[in-house]
Amino acid sequence: DIQMTQSPSSLSASVGDRVTITCRAGQNINNFLNWYQQKPGKAPKLLIYAASRLEGGVPSRFRGSGSGTYFTLTITGLQPEDFATYYCQQSYNKRTFGQGTKVEIK
Amino acid sequence: EVQLVESGGDLVQPGGSLRLSCAASGFIVSDYYMSWVRQAPTRGLEWVSILYSDGYTYYRDSVKGRFTISRDHSKNSLYLQMDYLRDEDTALYYCARTPVNTKAGEDYFDYWGPGTLVTVSS
């Protein structure tokens, strides 16, 4: 199975900050990489697919980049509703999620 | 409107069985890839199984031989038959939809249900 490693596992940030989360794949997954946001008690929500494509209705402050084994999710101008846990997920071979990054209020 | 609603979660003893259902509306289940994803309490997301539109199925190693994914076109529903349940199968189980795309890299979960809770305990 393809391992997905996210970092950091948690971070504290303030409203308006720029936040970057990284995700590394255990092997080349081309651009088969998606990002999800999950809030407590809710199902995950798709933010970014195919590494850099913004899902419809998702604010443009979310940006995904990368290919191969290294990917990033950047939130520019953090908003109160962005405090949540973020997961990367590969779909190159079966499916695997990263362990999650919890974004907390500083 | 696309909706997914899971049911069938319960408290079950180790070694027992359970069948989860996922009722879909707003689309045809057999036209999409459908998956089960689980989340243990206070833990991360873990993909469990996928059923492709052409009928192929795949499972994570830890459930292979114990879980079976299937669908019923007449009921427009997805199922997960879980046998020989273990403590570590305790989790909230989500069903999720993947659109069938031909563009490179476009393979993602675009709709999720609210989940159904499975607790394996004696």
Image (spheres, coloured by chain):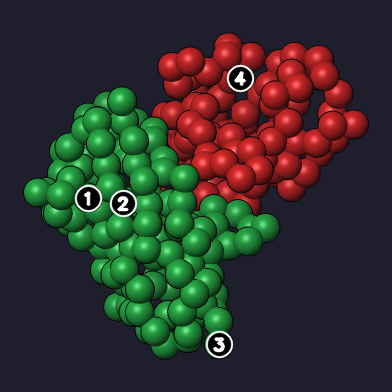
Chain colours: A red, B green
Residue type marked 3: Ser
Relative height, residue A8 to residue B8 (above, below): above
Can residue A40 be spotted in the picture?
A: yes
Residue type marked 2: Cys
Q: Are marks 1 and 4 in contact (CB under 8 Å)?
A: no
Q: Mark 3 lies on which chain?
A: B
Determine the residue positioned at 50% across, 61% down. B117
Q: What label does residue B122 carry, if any?
A: 3
Relative height, residue A60 to residue A40 (above, below): above
Q: Are marks 1 and 2 in contact (CB under 8 Å)?
A: yes
Can residue A51 be spotted in the picture?
A: no
Disc 4 marks which residue?
A62
Q: Quadrant of residue B33?
A: top left
Q: What label does residue B77 carry, if any?
A: 1
Question: Which is nearer the N-term, disc 1 or disc 2?
Answer: 2
Question: Which is nearer the N-term, disc 2 or disc 3?
Answer: 2
